[in-house]
Structure formats: C-alpha cells, structure tokens
Image (spheres, rainbow, N blue to C red):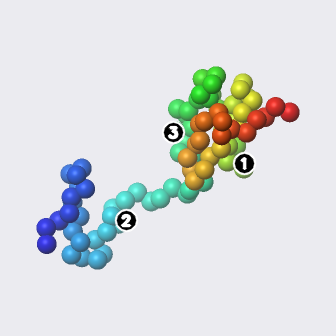
Amino acid sequence: MAPASSGYGATQSFDNPEDTMADSAVPPVEATRVDPRLLELLVCPLTKESLEYDAAREELISRSAKLAYPIRDGIPIMLPEEARSLAD
C-alpha cells in the first residue's frame, strides 16, 4: 500500500497500526490554556491597546475599553459583541 500524503510533504503509512500521527505530533496543549506567544500579539480590537490575561476567568481584559473577551477552548474570542462589560 502506498503511503498517504497530507499534501505538505509528510507521509504516513497506514500498514502499521503503531505508525500514527500522534507519535510524531507535538503534545496537545491544555484546551483552556492560551499560547503565551499569542497573548503577546493580541490587542483590543477597539482600542488597539494591550490586554491582560485572567486565567481564573479565562478572559482577556481590556482596561481601556472596559471589556473582558472570553477564551473558549483555548481560543480568544476577540469580538466586542461577545465581550463582557467591566463597567462597574
């Protein structure tokens, strides 16, 4: 049987059940964690200012916009209409 190709130059043989993508893949990141490198790049879509990460509430906080953007399954939802208001 010919090796299957993902189209990116990698091949995988399905003849051996122990030869799986999981063997060579990077270990999965915990679903609720956000990559710190991503956090360094993200800014508030309204103010373009930096955000604070609240791990306990799984939110990215924009103090200047007074909004808390949710993080769902490790993915920041950077839509103002999805954000929680911090106006207290």
Q: Is residue 32 visible?
A: yes
- Where disc 2 sits, the SS reads helix
Image quarter hosting the C terminus: top right
Q: Nearer the viewer, mark 1 or mark 2?
A: 1
Amino acid on which disc 2 is placed: Ala
On residue 37, the disc is 3
Mark 1 or mark 2: which comes first in sequence?
A: 2
How many dots with numbers?
3
Q: Nearer the viewer, residue 45 or 17?
A: 45
* Contact? badges 3 and 1 (CB < 8 Å): no
Q: Nearer the viewer, residue 1 or 80?
A: 80
On residue 47, the disc is none
* Contact? badges 2 and 3 (CB < 8 Å): no
- In the image, residue 78 lies at what x, y percent? 59, 36
Q: Is residue 33 visible?
A: no
- In the image, residue 47 lies at what x, y percent? 64, 22
Residue beneath disc 2: 22
- Where disc 1 sits, the SS reads loop
* Contact? badges 1 and 2 (CB < 8 Å): no
Amino acid on which disc 1 is placed: Arg
Few, some or many C-alpha atoms within 10 Å of disc 3 (few <14, some 14-19, many ≥20)? Answer: few
Depicted 28 relative to depicted 52: above or below: below
User: Residue at point 37% right, 65% down?
Assistant: 22
Few, some or many C-alpha atoms within 10 Å of disc 1 (few <14, some 14-19, many ≥20)? Answer: few
- Where disc 3 sits, the SS reads helix
Residue beneath disc 1: 57
Cα distance, mark 1 to mark 2? Answer: 31 Å
Relative placement, left or right, of 7 versus 41 is: left
